Image: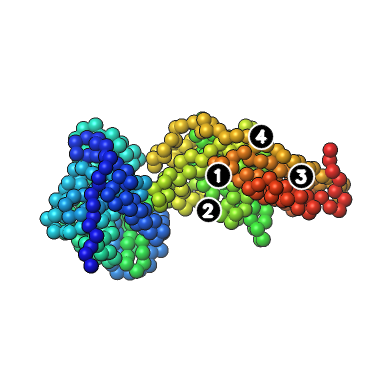
Amino acid sequence: MPKKKIEAPVGRLTCKKGDYCVGKAHDLADPHWQNKAREYRRKLSGGMRPLAAHDIQEIPKAKGLHVVRKYDGEFTYVVFDGQSIFSVNPGGTVRVGLPCFAEAEKALKKAKVRSCTLAAELYAGGDIGERNAVQAIVGLLRNPRTESDLQRVSLAVFDIAELNGESVDSADAVFKKLKTWFGKGKLAHAAEHVVADKAETIEDKFTEWVIAEGAEGVVVRHDRLGYYKIKLRHNLDAAVIGFSEGTDNRKGMVHDLLVAVMRTDGTYHELARVGGGFREEDRKEIFKDLRKRVVPSEYVAVNNDYVAYEMIGPGPVIEMSFLDLIPESSKGDPVKRMVLDFDGKQYAALSRMPLVSVISPQFVRIREDKEANVEDVNIRQVTDLVRVPDADEPARAGELKKSKLLDRQVYKKTMRGADMVRKLLLWRTNKEETGDFPGFVVYGTDFSPNRQTPLERDIKIASSEKAARELFTDMAKKYFVGGWEKVA
């Protein structure tokens, strides 16, 4: 059966400098290349296990472990049809005419390759520090000012997705071919790699490439064991804005924390859920402190077990560590998280804005010397490591409509000399059109000072007022029986 011919870009392309032009995937003769790029990265990300450097010994012993240098750049899917090259990333950006593409094209023609698709990183060559490597390549690709700028764009190829219409599954075969094709390349080259049979070799290359030379990390690939991504753990400071309680034998202890960084306009941008790294005594002491700080919130966040967080006035500040920050989904879309406004009494949701996914967040310590303010927990801690769109834009510019309280009932009961209070509220969010909020929320609180857990909450959501009022009535029947008196 004849192989389907790969067709180069056609249609609208915007030329930036010299032969370098950019466009969108829907302008390709075959617009499905963007889906190919997305599928490849989704498969790669889904099979990648992140590890810190001190966990390298956890990699099972095996022969033929390929240790590959990780480049801090833009992932791209390179398509060669036997005559010319273009690339498309998961976000749908198409690029043609880069000098590194011309070099790769020449090498593939010399090797008599009929067609192939390659997975690679476009990165900034030259004297670029690790701290601004991503910003450097973004700037070069978006707005090259001179031909010399284009000569600084390098292509590190780390995989062959397809060769002459067939998949290439063996790591040995991939790296042998890449070395044959690009072994003498300067702008276009195979990602640096070695073959290791023991963990000590992996540790040596990590020390050489990452510690000494400032590479982003290393990837270990094996046909049977899969992929491992090894990076240095980074640290940043974040404000605690919510917490959830443990269950069963962990009642009265923190299960996990909801943390945020602050944007320059003073709003709180939800960053991560931190559930690891705590000692048992940490969980008890932090819970004891945070339960005193609970405040109302029209925004309901849940943890990975779908338990709603108790929101607290911003703070304390924690130091947390993590393996990686990922600013895009596997489809190439920005990772969006909620931005909250705190008026000193309660939280209001503003809008979801781009931030990151935090890989392997871990609690390190409470920062007694820091506070939940713009200086101590600034979003710049994130943007210094990865590029985040609109990080400097004010979140309040997109402020949403205010919620409307539709019903409220309060009952009290005295037992053993202590007053117990139960409240039930129903409100419309007026934000359902955003797709980020339910239309209606029913919110119940049950306060009893004689219980081990004095304050308990119950939250229900609905898409219509009729359904919400039915939930409200059902909860009221359970809440207000057996001697409860209505408070005017």
What is the x, y in percent for residue 419?
83, 45
Q: In the rendering, at what x and y percent does residue 170 appear?
A: 27, 66
Q: Is residue 48 visible?
A: no
Which is nearer the N-term, disc 2 or disc 4? 2
Measuring from the top left, give residue 182's x and y in whole percent. Answer: 18, 54
Q: Which residue carries the number 1 mark? A: 436
Callout 3 amino acid: Lys
Residue at which label 2 appears: 277
For disc 1, the neighbor class at 10 Å (few under 14, some 14 to 19, many from 20) is: few
What residue is at 42 percent from the left and 49 percent from the top? 329
Q: Nearer the viewer, mark 3 or mark 4?
A: 3
The numbered mark at residue 345 is: 4
At horizontal 87% and vertical 50% (from top left) the residue drawn is 483
Label annotation for residue 70: none
Residue 434 image position (x, y, % from top left): 54, 41
How far apart are the two marked residues, 3 and 4, measured between alpha carbons?
Answer: 18 Å
How far is mark 2 from mark 3, CA to CA?
A: 36 Å
| Residue that numbered label 3 is attached to | 423
- The amino acid on which the numbered mark 4 sits, given as a three-letter code, is Lys
Q: Nearer the viewer, residue 310 or 233?
A: 310
Q: CA distance from mark 4 to mark 1?
A: 23 Å
Position of residue 236 in the picture relative to residue 427 (left or right): left
